[in-house]
Amino acid sequence: MPDMPTPYEMRDWKQVAIKYDQLVYDLTNTNPYFPLVGIKSSGINYPSLKPIYLQTYVGSSSTQAEAINIIPSIVGASLVGIDKSNQSGVNWVEKVKDFFNKNNGQNVYLNNYSATSGGDWWYDTMPN
């Protein structure tokens, strides 16, 4: 059996990651339900930091922030060569620091900016 059976076409995952980043991190997109990402005025754990919010699903209107969604998007973009530490003048890497729950004494990265550990294995381990 061949390694790549025919017909078979491998998706260009690098290009998918680049296009995802272009769509999600475009602060100038004025289409309905956009932009998907935004910047809060101050952090909970690091008040001088302006953390990120990212819609969990397209069409939601709140300023949600889930590490399980945000951190992998920044890591993935970095792995395909996008400089998330200075993209359009924004240091997206620094902004995820607020997921480190220092203010409430948890002292670990959690899924939200103010959360508690011990409730869900996936949400406790993934951001770390």
Image (spheres, helix red, strand yellow):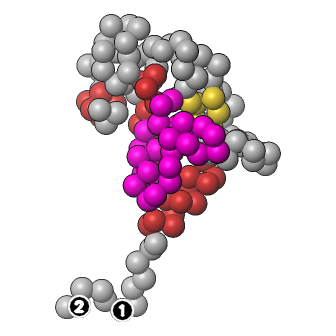
State the residue in front, 47 or 66. Answer: 47
Tell me the kind of residue under disc 2: Pro
Q: Is residue 62 above or below residue 89?
A: above
Quadrant in the rendering for residue 109: top left
The disc placed on residue 97 is none
Residue 39 position, x and y percent, is: 63, 29
Look at mark 1 in the image and give the residue it sits on.
6
Residue farthest to the top, as pictured: 104
Element under disc 1: loop
Region rendered in magenta: 71-95
> Is residue 97 found inside the magenta-colored segment of the image?
no
The disc placed on residue 2 is 2
Spatial separation of the CA atoms under disc 2 and disc 1: 9 Å
* Residue that appears at 36% across and 92% down: 6
Report the label total. Answer: 2
State the residue in front, 45 or 110. Answer: 45
Assess whether mark 1 and mark 2 are in contact (beta carbons under 8 angstroms).
yes
* Residue that appears at 75% across and 44% down: 28
128 sits left or right of 77 in the view? left
Element under disc 2: loop
Please rate how many residues cluster around mark 2, counting C-alpha atoms within 10 Å: few if below 14, some from 14 to 19, many from 20.
few
Residue 12 position, x and y percent, is: 46, 72
Tell me the kind of residue under disc 1: Thr
Residue 88 position, x and y percent, is: 64, 45
